[in-house]
Amino acid sequence: MQSLFKTSQGKKEILGLYDQKLKELAIEFEYLNIKTSFGETNIITIGAISSPPIIIIHGSNGCAPIALETYPNLSKHFRVFAIDVLAQPNKSGETRLDMKDDSYGQWMNEVIDALKVENVILVGFSFGGLVVLKTLEFNERVIKEVYLSAPAYIVNGNPLKALFKIFIPMKRYIKTRKLRYVEKFLAEVFSERDEFAIQYLSKVFLYFDMDFTSIPVIGARKANTIQTPITLFAAKNDILFPGKKMIKRAKRIFPGLQSVKLLENSKHVLSKKQNELIEKIIIENNT
């Protein structure tokens, strides 16, 4: 199988930034490598083994260290498992799964089975939200509850807006390698400037075969079968997955929807303060 990393040097640079971010976190961690029918899955785990399990799943073109940085205090209360999603610029296998079938749900259930955890909490941001919901669709038996922030798979935004504000700057950067196009992209997607994201994504855009497949939305009938409690955080100014539209549909289709919050002044990638709020709510609800 051809690698999703376009060059060996590009892979080295991207994973070098992965290791740099992990080092900056200054945490005691353990790597786990789980073999699944879809490929090997790399996991970073932190926190006391005796603590309740929580799995955090990063967004598209992301990695586990970014997820750990987003919620730095969870390990004080939970055994945290940060997943490197398959076929993303990280240390997991490179098998690209189909978003339209149950592959992501089956994969994550295989990971959970291998970890031998029950009553697990799932936390997913953006594309990680799609993975969480697919997990519930496939088998929600061992899932205690889920927290979704600006998740994919509930609604989609205006494709023309996404084209002009997100994808065209990305393509222009790939063509010209002028960093201002990465910054233009980030200004539309990120609520606040992120220097590491500029470094990381400037390498990912050039050296990784990104998936531009259209993201599906969950059908009302499937959503209605999910009984697991869901807490949803939607971003008001999210071009990709608009917050008001998301909340309106989520209230209609998810019987287990426990709480929703529309985050004001938020683009797709939330600010540090908004992520702190989510982290605080997760901890308060489970301690």
Image (cartoon, grey):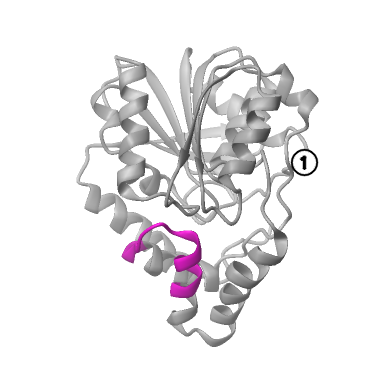
Disc 1 marks a residue whose amino acid type is Lys
- Tell me where residue 251 sits by quadrant: top right
Name the quarter where the N terminus is drawn.
bottom right
Whether residue 9 can be seen here: no
Name the quarter where the C terminus is drawn.
top left
Frontmost residue, 34 versus 154:
154
Whether residue 165 can be seen here: yes
Question: Does the stretch in magenta take in 185?
Answer: yes
Residue positioned 52% across, 53% down in the render: 237
Task: Name the chief secondary structure element in magenta.
Answer: helix
The answer to whether 123 is drawn above or below residue 5 in the figure is above
Q: Secondary structure at mark 1?
A: loop
The answer to whether 85 is drawn above or below residue 61 in the figure is above
Residue positioned 64% across, 72% down in the render: 164
- Tell me where residue 51 sits by quadrant: top left
The answer to whether 157 is drawn above or below residue 284 in the figure is below
Residue 27 image offset from top left, x and y in percent: 22, 41
Question: Does the stretch in magenta take in 71?
Answer: no
Tell me the magenta residue range. Answer: 183-196
* Residue density around tag 1, few if under 14, some if 14–19, many if 20 or more, within 10 Å: few
Which residue is the extreme one toward the left?
26
Q: Is residue 72 left or right of residue 222?
A: left
Frontmost residue, 70 versus 98:
70
Q: Name the residue beneath numbered marker 1.
A: 100
Residue 243 image offset from top left, x and y in percent: 56, 44
Q: Is residue 150 left or right of residue 77?
A: right
The answer to whether 132 is drawn above or below residue 264 in the figure is above
Residue 10 image offset from top left, x and y in percent: 48, 71
Residue 36 image offset from top left, x and y in percent: 61, 33
